[in-house]
């Protein structure tokens, strides 16, 4: 039995869910998301609750819990949305917004252009880049791509990191010991 799969999803006011054969569509104030249901996973809607059920064997429990959490994220996304904040730390690191896109100076010989994907909204304040959207998967993947442009180096902590991320710092390398 999946502990996550057994949990009931409460459908908030203003959010509608439509299930057609093997596809689920969630519509809310922020937009619409749809996803294909995994095989042998059932969805039942009654009043303002949604129950995800496993119609397969016990080895299908992980997929059951996964599908329930994906649907829960869809409901939360169309109601509230998701955001991730990235921090630029380094001498001369800066962000400039160009329409929907952002240009970053992160220590390379050239500026790096970040083009916003469909469903992603970018916002900058000094050295903090905020990535917003209704699809948790897209927001997380886009944030990871931006972070991979300049990973944090462990000696001075220069680079791009998530706000609130703990950076494990290394001790600065010392010189070679001298022989007497």
Image: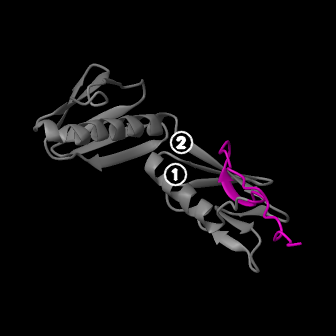
Which residue is found at the position 55% from the left and 58% from the top? 144
Outermost right residue:
180
Work out whether residue 164 or residue 105 is closer to the camera in this orientation and state it. Answer: 164
Residue 147: where, in percent of width, then height?
A: 61, 60
Q: Which mark is residue 45?
A: none
Q: Position of residue 161 (x, y in %)?
A: 66, 53
Query: What label sits on residue 82 in the rendered view?
Result: 2
Q: Does 113 sit left or right of 61 as displayed?
A: right
Earlier residue among tags 2 and 1 = 2
The answer to whether residue 168 is visible is: yes
In this image, 122 relative to 134: left or right? right
Write down the residue under mark 1. Answer: 139
Task: Assess whether mark 1 and mark 2 are in contact (beta carbons under 8 angstroms).
Answer: yes
Q: For the magenta stretch, what is the residue range? A: 155-180
What number of labels is visible? 2
Say what secondary structure mark 2 lies in.
Answer: strand
Quarter placement of the C terminus: bottom right
C-alpha span from label 2 to label 1: 7 Å
- Asked whether residue 135 appears in the rendered view, the answer is no
Q: The residue tagged with tag 1: helix, strand or loop?
A: helix
* Magenta run includes residue 156: yes
């Amino acid at each position: 039995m999946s502990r996550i799969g057994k949990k009931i999803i409460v459908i908030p006011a203003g959010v509608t869910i439509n299930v057609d054969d093997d596809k689920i569509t969630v519509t809310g104030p922020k937009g619409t998301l749809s996803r294909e249901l995994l095989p042998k996973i059932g969805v039942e809607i009654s009043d303002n609750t949604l129950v995800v059920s496993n119609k397969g064997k016990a080895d299908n429990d992980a997929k059951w819990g996964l599908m329930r959490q994906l649907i829960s994220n869809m409901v939360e996304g169309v109601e509230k949305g998701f955001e991730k904040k990235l921090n630029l730390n380094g001498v001369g690191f800066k962000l400039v917004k160009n329409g929907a896109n952002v240009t970053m100076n992160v220590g390379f010989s050239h500026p790096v252009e970040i083009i916003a994907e469909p469903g992603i909204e970018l916002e900058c304040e000094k050295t903090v880049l905020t990535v917003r959207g209704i699809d948790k998967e897209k927001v997380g993947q886009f944030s990871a791509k931006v972070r991979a442009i300049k990973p944090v180096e462990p000696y001075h902590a220069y680079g791009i990191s998530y706000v609130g991320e703990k950076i494990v710092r290394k001790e600065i390398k010392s010189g070679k010991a001298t022989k007497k």
